Image (cartoon, rainbow, N blue to C red):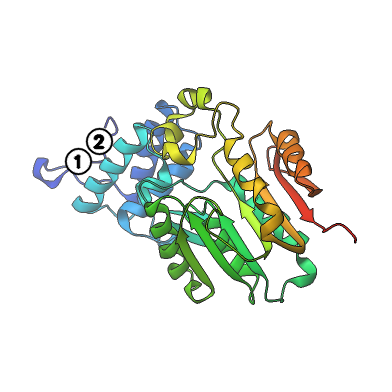
Amino acid sequence: MTSGVGNKAATNGEPLPTRIEAIAMVADDLEAAGVAHPQDEARALLRGAAALTRLELALAPRAPLTEDESRILADYLARRIAREPLSRILGERGFWTLDLIVAPGVLDPRPDTETLIEAALSLVAEKRDAPLSILDLGSGSGAIVCALLSELPAARALAVDLSPEACAATAANLARCGLSDRAEVVQGRWAEALCGRFDLVVSNPPYVRTGDIAGLDPEVRLHDPAMALDGGADGLDCYRDIIRDQPRLLAEDAFVLFEVGFDQAASVAELLGAQGLQIERVARDAGGHERIVAARFAPPLT
């Protein structure tokens, strides 16, 4: 590490840097490595290394690092320069209003997915206090199901994922958020073994085209599991599998919402329409991309 944060040890007679000095040195190294928002990330790494809250750092920015803190910060910086995501280094990520565990071998939740939460809550706004039944297909870290249950106090949820690591992560985050008593986690492939009907079905399935995976940012390509990224040749394989089951899973006037790739909204809407579902909304993320496709199930009149 070029900044010397981890090298100024008491053994050579030099004082260790203060917190604010360490942030400056780490930010310089991050900027040189091409990491975006180096000041913000440097502060986050320092807070993680020294186990500080934002308030504690603000109240004592000129306190010197301890040797242990300096060593941990040097390790964190080396990992970030190697393009390990900040959230994986620190082991957690803020999502919606929650702090979630980011587990190895499980997709790191992204801010774009908060668009799905916003759209879902808007669609069920009139039923916010109702005992809604939610199905999360491909739950991953549990970010979606945790966020929805935190906003819908009478709802219950079933979270499904094929990966045992993802099931464990979902269960851990439900427990961390105090939501375990309103959710069940099941290992399985989509809805193959499920029966019953749900008021709200949500999913952020793998949607990256197989041929595009090699070109993803190293933070994604090297650290997110391939099973959570690869959507097949056209990126739509998982949507086809999931949408095929929707007519038997959705209660009357229920909604299904998908996160989609930036250029996939029209294709996913077409797949939903072919199963008799009515497109209710296409929502854009903060970058202006069509990110969420929402549809409603209305049984034909007899």
**Residue 120 % position (x, y):** 71, 58
- Quarter of the N terminus within the rendering: top left
Residue 48 numbered tag:
none
Q: Is residue 232 visible?
A: yes
Category of crowding for the residue at label 1, using alpha-carbon neighbours closer than 10 angstroms: few (below 14), some (14–19), many (at least 20): some
Q: Identify the residue at image location x=43%, y=64%.
A: 171
**Residue 14 % position (x, y):** 17, 42
The one nearer the camera, 59 or 92, is 92
Q: Identify the residue at image location x=73%, y=58%.
A: 255
Q: Is residue 288 visible?
A: no
Q: Identify the residue at image location x=59%, y=68%.
A: 149
The one nearer the camera, 143 or 139, is 139
Category of crowding for the residue at label 2, using alpha-carbon neighbours closer than 10 angstroms: few (below 14), some (14–19), many (at least 20): some
The residue under label 1 is 8
The one nearer the camera, 84 or 198, is 198
Q: Quadrant of residue 199?
A: bottom right
**Residue 233 % position (x, y):** 56, 26
The residue under label 2 is 4
Determine the residue located farthest toward the front in the rendered image.
302
Q: For the residue marked with disc 2, what is the amino acid?
A: Gly
Q: For the residue marked with disc 1, what is the amino acid?
A: Lys
- Give the alpha-carbon distance from disc 1 to disc 2, as whole Å: 6 Å
**In screen coordinates, is 127 left or right of 243?**
right
Element class at badge 2 = loop
**In screen coordinates, is 24 left or right of 36?**
left
**Residue 261 % position (x, y):** 63, 35
Please give the count of numbered marks on the rendered protein: 2
For the residues labelled 1 and 2, say whether their Cβ atoms are less than 8 Å apart. yes
The one nearer the camera, 126 or 199, is 199
